[in-house]
Image: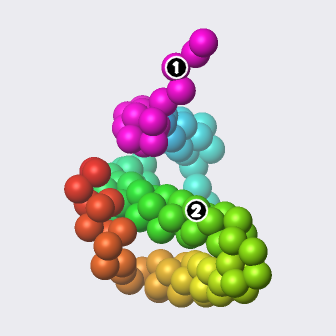
């Protein structure tokens, strides 16, 4: 029987893979820019510089999102397992997580760094 990884093993494996995928993405962008330069005047290093400077933020935001919405999914499923009262609570969990998602997306669009109290601390420890 195949070994099923724990959540911690899965996250660790994905973080290890993220580094090579990030490098591959940067290489692909540079290759495309060398073949067909962008229409505006920019050096090849602009994209690299931006990606490299914000890499840690991208990974931290992704980890924070996985923690928050993974917990929201588990809470939703637990609420659905409880008859009547749990079904009502599941509605609040669903709409609460949707509202949180919209707020976090808006803050990210504005470029604001936003750390949720518990999930942000856990995400920083994992990275």
Q: Is residue 35 left or right of residue 11?
A: right
Residue 23 seen in this snapshot: no
SS at circle 2: helix
- Which residue is found at the position 41% from the left and 57% from the top? 63
Please give the range of residues in magenta.
Answer: 1-20
Measuring 48% from the left and 68% from the top, which residue is drawn there?
68
- What x and y, as percent, mark residue 42? 45, 59
Q: Earlier in the sequence, mark 2 or mark 1?
A: 1
Residue at screen point 51% across, 64% down: 71
Specify the principal SS of the magenta part. Answer: helix
For residue 121, which quarter of the picture? bottom left
* Mark seen at residue 3: 1
**Residue 74 has which mark?**
2
Q: Is residue 119 above or below residue 32?
A: below
Q: Toward the viewer: 86 or 117?
A: 86
Badge 1 marks a residue whose secondary structure is loop
Q: Can you give x and y, in whole percent of width and height, for residue 8 in the image? A: 38, 41
Residue in view at x 58 percent, y 62 percent: 74
Going by the image, does 86 lie left or right of 50?
right
- Judging depth in this view, the residue of 3 and 43 nearest the camera is 3
Q: Is residue 47 shown in magenta?
A: no
Q: Is residue 36 above or below residue 58?
A: above
Q: Is residue 4 magenta?
A: yes
> Measured along the vertical axis of the image, is residue 51 above or below residue 26?
below
Bin the neighbour count of mark 1 within 10 Å (Cα to Cα): few under 14, some 14-19, many 20 and up.
few
Q: Nearer the viewer, residue 28 or 5?
A: 5
Residue 30, x across and y down, in percent: 49, 41
């Amino acid at each position: 029987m195949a070994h099923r990884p724990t959540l911690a093993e899965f996250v660790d494996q994905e973080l290890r893979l993220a580094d090579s995928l990030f490098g591959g993405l940067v290489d692909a962008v540079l290759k495309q820019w060398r073949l067909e330069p962008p229409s505006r005047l920019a050096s090849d290093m602009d994209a690299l510089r931006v990606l490299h400077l914000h890499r840690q933020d991208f990974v931290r935001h992704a980890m924070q999102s996985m923690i928050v919405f993974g917990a929201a999914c588990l809470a939703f499923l637990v609420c659905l397992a409880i008859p009547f009262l749990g079904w009502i609570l599941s509605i609040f969990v669903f709409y609460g997580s949707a509202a949180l998602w919209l707020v976090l997306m808006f803050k990210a669009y504005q470029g604001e760094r936003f750390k949720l109290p518990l999930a942000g601390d856990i995400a920083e420890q994992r990275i």
